[in-house]
Amino acid sequence: NGVLLEVRDLSVDYYAVNGIVHAVKEVSFELRRGEILGLAGESGCGKSTLAYAISRLLRPPAYITGGQVLYHPRKPEKREATSHIVAVSDLSSGQSAHNGTAAASPLPSPETIDVLRLSPAQLRAFRWNEMAIVFQSAMNALNPVMTIGTQIMDVLKTHCPEMSTAQRKERAAELLKLVGIAPDRLRSYPHELSGGMRQRAVIAIALALTPELIIMDEPTTALDVVVQREILDLISSLCREFSTALIFITHDLSLLLELADTIAVMYAGKMVEKASSREFYAHPRHPYSYGLLNSFPKLHGPIRRMAGIPGSPPDLRSVPAGCAFHPRCPFAWQPCQRLEPQLLPSTAETPRQLVACHLYDAHQRPEGPPSSAEF
Ligand code: SF4
Ligand code: MG
């Protein structure tokens, strides 16, 4: 399974009245096709900002100050074979079906798309065909004065002008069925649906053009626990079915352990740990990850000790020197206050589990990494 998205040294600053806020600092990661990446951290750690930056939705006073977002689209032949639902027009060839509309224009390169350099018109094509975004409030994502059916069909109309009205209607009903909503709901207005159904409808719209990547920012936070559970199951089964890659953002790490293939933890604008869910759960490496994991009761099984993390995240205008976590870290010692730890393989045995902490750095800690008994 190849790499779909590469984020390289991405940085975002907010130019606030009372200072510059480094909201995202040199974040790098790769996402494979079909991979579910869970992005966790307390609120204000930069995870939403990172999502906005990747999807080019940042608005002033927030600016991308460095880095790259590279996207590798599927080969045209492959797209043909795997677009189960609707024939997605060939974005890499010049003769796109979008030519007739003002909304979208063909994407530039068949090999790699430099997302931060797309023109506004290319971006519109990219957003629905390749990347879809689902944000926290389904109520805000939906137009209150249009029926669900009209909203789905509008997306299809803009991006697949070759479809007839009857085909669009059929496809809209199919999409609703896919997310577990009865097709007669096409005629419903958002306020006639429950919160869970609205979130399902938003997911249906996101899936309309079978994107390769969906980014979801706290999509279930406003829902009660049972509905949240149902929506998560739906999201994970749809992503598996269509091998859609997913970046799922939440402050609730316990949700991610069941949903995600990979977990990345952010703190004060930086990625401080990244590992497979299995490795992460078996042995979180970063003291902050360890604290997060223990501060949430598990959904299933015995409730673990809720240790929590004393203190609160730093004000991003004045992040502590060295490791930003050091004022809250029970393991901090001299180098932590001076040197910023880099995201590196944690141990020789777990080269794919990356961590930014001096405890795992042989130069800083000559006696080697701590044993789990130390935690
Ligand atoms: Fe704690 Fe030091 Fe590791 Fe930061 S680098 S998490 S302060 S031990
Ligand atoms: Mg947020």
Image (cartoon, grey):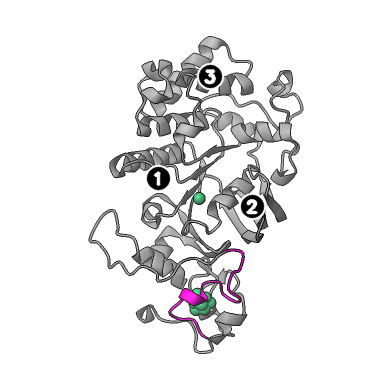
Q: Amino acid at mark 3?
A: Met
Mark 3 Cβ inside 8 Å of ligand 2: no
Within 10 angstroms of label 3, few (less than 14), some, or many (20 or more) residues?
many
State the residue lying farthest toward the front: 18
Q: Amino acid at mark 1?
A: Thr
320 magenta-colored? yes
Q: Amino acid at mark 2?
A: Glu
The residue singled out by tag 2 in the image is 6
Q: Which region of the structure is painted magenta?
A: 316-333
The residue singled out by tag 1 in the image is 221
Circle 3 or circle 1, nearest the eye: 1
Q: 312 or 336, which is in the foreground?
A: 312
Task: Measuring from the top left, give residue 120's x and y in whole percent.
Answer: 72, 34
260 magenta-colored? no
Task: Measuring from the top left, give residue 203's x and y in whole percent.
Answer: 46, 33
Asked if the residues shown at circle 3 and circle 1 are in contact, with their CB atoms under 8 angstroms apart, the answer is: no
**Residue placed at 31% from the left, 42% from the top?**
224
Whether 367 is drawn above or below 316: the answer is below
Gap between marks 1 and 2 measured at Cα: 27 Å
Q: 58 or 201, which is in the foreground?
A: 58
Circle 2 or circle 3, nearest the eye: 3
Element type where label 2 sits in the image:
strand
Kindly identify which numbered label has been placed on residue 153: 3
| Quadrant occupied by the C terminus | bottom left
Element type where label 1 sits in the image:
loop
Within 10 angstroms of label 2, few (less than 14), some, or many (20 or more) residues?
some
